[in-house]
Amino acid sequence: METRLVIGGGGTGGHLFPGIAIAEAFIEWEKGNEVLFIGTERGIEMRILGEKGFKLKTIGAKPIKGRSILEKIKAIWGLPRSVLEAVSILKEFKPDMVIGVGGYASAPVLIAAWLMGIKRVLHEQNAIPGMANRILKYFTHHIFISFEGAKRYFPKDKTTLTGMPVRKDLFSFINNHNGNKRDKFNIFIFGGSAGAHRINEKMLEALDYLEGIRSSLRLIHQTGFHDYEWVSSYYRAKGFEAIVKPFFDDMGRYYKISHLVICRAGASTIAELAICGKASILIPYPYAAHNHQFINAKQLVEIGAAMMIEDKELTGKGLSEKIIFIFEHPEEREKMEKAVKTIAMPDAAKDIVRYCYQMVTG
C-alpha cells in the first residue's frame, strides 16, 4: 500500500536528523511511499533536506525557548496562524500519518493533524521531554522514545522505547567503507550542526599542551560557519595536521576513521556514538532544557563508555590531559568502545516505521 507521511519539526540537527532517518526507512519500506517535511525557513532543514532529496514546506512558526518575553508573546500569538498554514499544507498533501520530531514547527503540525483527524505520532529524543511534547502527548496516538527514563512522562499504554533513529549514510560508511588514515590518532571534534564556539576555543587552547604528540595526531574539526576561518588558520599556524570544515555532510566517513570523538551530548550524538562504537569526551551543552545533555553524558560515564567535562570546567589544559590519557592508554579506549556499543539500537527508524504502518493499516 503506497503511503504518505508528513514529518513536522526541525530547527536543529538534533531534531532534523532523526526525522531524516525515519524518512529514509519509510521510503525503503515500500515502493511509491512519499514523504513531506514541514519546517521553517529559519531552521537547518532549509539547507539539508534538498541535498537529501526530500521535499520541504515551511510555516511561520517561531521559537519560544530562550527568547525574550516580547519574542515569546509574538511566537505564541502567531501559533494559530502557523496551525492554519499547516492545515493548508496537509489538505494539499493528504498524508496518512504525521510524525512530530521536535523543534518549534512540530507543535503546529501535530495540532493541525489533530484538527483534521489524521493519525499522528510523536518522537521524543531526550530522557526528559520539553513542555511542548508533554502537552502534545494528549494530541497523539502514540509516542516513541529514545531513552528508558522518558517513559515516566508519557502514558504507558501508548509509549514505545525504540531508541534514536540514525541516518542511513552513517550505516553505509560503517558497513561498506574500509577505515583509512589509521597511521595517526584521529580526533573528531564537533559541537552540533551549528558548531560550538566554546569547544572550538578550548580545543585550540589544548594544542599548546599537545605539542609532545603533535606528529601522531590528526584533528578532524567541524567548526560551524562563524569560526571556520579562525580555527583552520590556527591549526596551520600551530603546525597540526587538520581536516577543518564548517559542516560535514559525510559524518559517517569521519566517525569511521576516528579514534576519539570530542563533542556535545545531544541525544542524536549519543546514538551515533553507540552505533559507531566510539570512545568520547563529552562536553554537555549547559543551557539544554532540563540539563538533559548532562544527564545523557552521565549515563555514558556511569557505564564506562565516555569521559565528561562539564562546560563550566572546560579548559584547554584539562581537555588536553584527557586526550593524552586516551592516546597513551589504548586499552581504556577499547573498553569505552565496547561499553558504548551495549546501548546501541540500530533498528530504531525501522521499528518506528513498522509501528506506523500497523496504525495506518489498522
Image: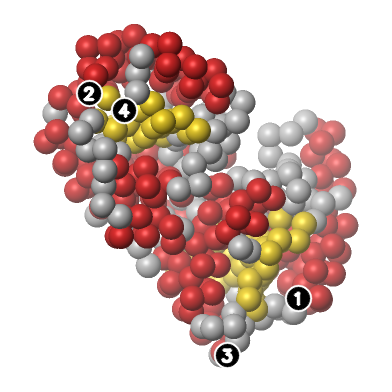
Q: In the rendered structure, which amino acid carries the disc numbered 1?
A: Phe
- C-alpha gap between disc 2 and disc 3: 55 Å
Closer to viewer: mark 4 or mark 3: 4
Earlier in the chain: of badge 2 and badge 3, it is: 3
Say which residue label 3 marks.
1
Q: Is residue 337 visible?
A: yes
Say which residue label 2 marks.
216
Looking at the picture, how far across and down is residue 26, in whole percent? 53, 74
Q: Which residue is drawn at 22% across and 12% down?
A: 212
* 229 vs 165: above or below: above
Residue contact at pointers 4 and 1, CB within 8 angstroms: no
Say which residue label 4 marks.
218
* 201 vs 147: above or below: above
Looking at the picture, how far across and down is residue 147, in whole percent? 41, 55
For mark 4, does the 10 Å Cα neighbourhood hold few (<14), some (14 to 19), or many (20 or more) residues? Answer: many
Say which residue label 1 marks.
93
Find numbered disc 4 in the image and state the secondary structure of the residue it sits on. Answer: strand
Number of numbered callouts drawn:
4
Q: In the rendered structure, which amino acid carries the disc numbered 4?
A: Arg
Specify whether 155 is left or right of 346. Answer: right
- C-alpha gap between disc 4 and disc 3: 49 Å
- C-alpha gap between disc 4 and disc 1: 48 Å
- Location of the N terminus by quadrant is bottom right
Is the image coloured rainbow, by chain, by secondary structure, or in one colour? secondary structure
**Rendering quarter of residue 349:** bottom left
Q: In the rendered structure, which amino acid carries the disc numbered 3?
A: Met
